């Protein structure tokens, strides 16, 4: 292996060990480059040689036949390269808003990793050209609409493949331009397609799994933030501490529930604000007469059931992480070139159901988490419910000044939108491709919609944290907070000052939302 410049970090691509964290690090590190494991070139060359030899002897789907229902059309040898160009151009027909450059780059990395496994029959030259685009951060413009998620993300991946042959538009150095212009600036040439290479580039789940690899890390971060905000909220209402008792959760031993309760206990280990049930209960007079007490003996579900509600979110995101990690290291195109066994395997590894189901389940879990946060926002802002805090946590003159009244509308509407997105998109199977693709996954669209739910969750969590910080100021309880909650309070106040006189909070909230996404101190998964 060649010696690398030690000032540059490398993402090693070998086909078996790519992680969502690897993809995130590469995207966030502009100087990072890809490097191939030493075994890759040998596998690629053997696979390619076997494909080229066999294509002269027998029909091979997508190599010397038409595609899908047109498989019965045998293509003449002089036209095999043209067939691949036609495939890419004929599928690069997406429309709508472009997907983010980060999502496209993630998909390119996943596709490179898949091809590096050596089961796709592509040339080593193609591998190097794809690396070149990735390393120079040349990200094709990929429209949002077009994929049904079986045969993979054909339309979206065709737009990536289009750039490899020097066509279509790309983003390079922060500017949109034609691929040919970007190539000219760098002094590089388009790739010349060989048999099967167009099919290998667009067949498979690289787009949906690339997007999902980024989303699943966002989901884990959101769970960590929600756990912290939940702990913070428990302090402010003087919650009865037995809701966190280890035995309670051991008796219902779901891993996510146990982990969430443990995390909250750790966050609140130095809290002086939680209430002891025995002490509170001892103040209640129990006698022979039926009567009403004013002593609060049990908290509402959005506080008392945090471990039981967030626990399934933890378990769901963990399962999804494992599914996506498997997918980004899988061979997902067709046919598979088994040069070791001297055969071609025709199957359905391109079907995106695993990713679609995993991301749909994660999306639904995040919507429930968002609803949990919205309910706590309502609790603190609704004086008729909490009986303690001023209406809308108004710090000045209720009635004349608004407090957080307007902000609650944002939390409510954003949560409602996410609830509409919660329905699993993977069940929206509509037959297509002349009924050849008669049951489809809709995995790419599922991932795109999940991305909207993630963004909404960050908005609602930011609003909840502003609400909790305002509640601290309304009660003057900052010095009594646990270390963890005080840290969270101070982070909020760094970006959003206390709301006394009415003002637009939009710029403050945008800063806070951005900070929540990047602050490593708030993450349990770092």
Image (cartoon, grey):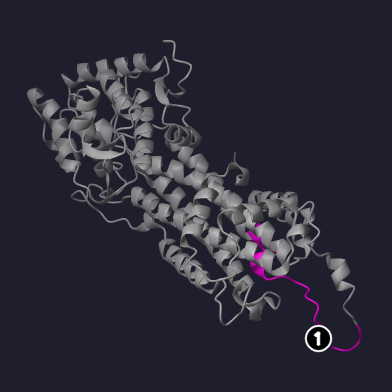
Q: Nearer the viewer, residue 335 or 127?
A: 127
Secondary structure of the residue carrying numbered label 1: loop
Report the quarter where the N terminus lies. top left
Q: Is residue 453 above or below residue 283?
A: above
Q: Nearer the viewer, residue 265 or 334?
A: 265
Name the residue rendered at 78%, 73% in the picture. Answer: 297
Res. 376 image quadrant? bottom right
Residue 317, given in percent of the width and then of the height, sits at 54, 48
Position of 476 with respect to 179 (left or right) is: right
Name the residue rendered at 24%, 20% in the picture. Answer: 51
Report the quarter where the C terminus lies. top right
Q: Nearer the viewer, residue 78 or 368?
A: 368
Q: Is residue 364 visible?
A: no
Name the residue rendered at 47%, 56% in the picture. Answer: 510
Magenta span: helix, strand or loop, mainly? Answer: loop
Q: Is residue 234 visible?
A: yes
Q: Is residue 239 above or below residue 322?
A: below
Res. 72 image quadrant? top left
Res. 35 image quadrant? top left
Residue 330, given in percent of the width and then of the height, sits at 41, 32
Residue 366 part of the magenta segment: no
Residue 242, given in percent of the width and then of the height, sits at 79, 61
Question: Going by the picture, which residue comes out furthest to the front?
Answer: 501
Residue 454, given in percent of the width and then of the height, sits at 46, 54
* Mark 1 lies on residue: 292
Magenta region: 287-308
Q: Is residue 45 above or below residue 222?
A: above
């Amino acid at each position: 292996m060649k010696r690398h410049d030690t000032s540059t970090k490398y993402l090693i691509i070998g086909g078996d060990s790519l992680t969502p964290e690897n993809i995130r690090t590469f995207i966030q590190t502009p100087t990072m480059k890809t490097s191939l494991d030493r075994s890759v070139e040998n596998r690629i060359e053997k696979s390619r040689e076997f494909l080229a030899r066999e294509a002269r002897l027998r029909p091979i789907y997508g190599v010397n036949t038409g595609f899908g229902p047109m498989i019965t059309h045998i293509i003449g040898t002089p036209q095999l390269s043209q067939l691949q160009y036609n495939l890419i151009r004929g599928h690069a027909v997406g429309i709508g808003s472009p997907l983010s450059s980060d999502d496209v780059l993630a998909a390119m990395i996943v596709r490179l990793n898949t091809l590096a496994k050596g089961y796709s029959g592509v040339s080593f030259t193609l591998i190097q050209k794809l690396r070149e685009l990735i390393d120079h951060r040349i990200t094709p413009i990929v429209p949002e609409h077009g994929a049904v998620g079986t045969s993979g993300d054909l339309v979206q991946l065709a737009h990536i493949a289009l750039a490899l042959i020097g066509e279509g538009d790309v983003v390079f150095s922060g500017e949109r331009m034609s691929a040919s212009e970007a190539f000219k600036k760098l002094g590089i040439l388009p790739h010349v397609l060989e048999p099967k290479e167009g099919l290998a580039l667009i067949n498979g789940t690289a787009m949906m799994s690339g997007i999902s690899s980024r989303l699943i890390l966002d989901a884990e971060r959101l769970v960590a933030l929600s756990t912290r905000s939940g702990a913070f909220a428990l302090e402010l209402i003087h919650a009865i501490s037995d809701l966190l008792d280890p035995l309670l959760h051991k008796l219902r031993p779901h891993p996510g529930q146990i982990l969430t309760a443990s995390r909250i206990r750790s966050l609140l280990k130095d809290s002086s604000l939680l209430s002891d049930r025995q002490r509170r209960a001892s103040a209640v007079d129990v006698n022979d007469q039926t009567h009403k007490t004013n002593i609060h003996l049990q908290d509402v579900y959005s506080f008392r059931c945090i471990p039981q509600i967030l626990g399934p979110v933890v378990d769901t995101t963990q399962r999804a992480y494992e599914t996506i990690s498997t997918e980004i290291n899988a061979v997902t195109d067709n046919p598979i070139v088994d040069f070791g066994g001297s055969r071609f395997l025709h199957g359905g590894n391109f079907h995106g159901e695993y990713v679609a189901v995993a991301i749909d389940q994660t999306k639904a879990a995040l919507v429930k988490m968002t609803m949990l946060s919205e309910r706590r926002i309502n609790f603190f802002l609704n004086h008729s419910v909490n009986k303690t805090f001023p209406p809308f946590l108004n710090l000045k003159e209720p009635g004349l000044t608004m407090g957080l009244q307007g902000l609650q509308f944002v939390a409510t509407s954003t949560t409602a939108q996410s609830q509409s997105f919660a329905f699993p998109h993977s069940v929206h199977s509509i037959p297509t491709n002349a009924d050849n693709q008669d049951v489809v996954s809709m995995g790419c669209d599922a991932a795109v919609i999940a991305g909207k739910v993630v963004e909404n969750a960050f908005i609602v969590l930011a609003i909840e944290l502003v609400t909790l910080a305002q509640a601290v100021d309304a009660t003057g309880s900052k010095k009594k907070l646990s270390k963890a909650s005080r840290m969270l309070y101070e982070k909020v106040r760094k970006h959003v000052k206390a709301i006394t006189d009415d003002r637009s909070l939009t710029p403050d909230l945008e800063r806070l939302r951005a900070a929540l996404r990047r602050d490593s101190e708030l993450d349990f998964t770092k």
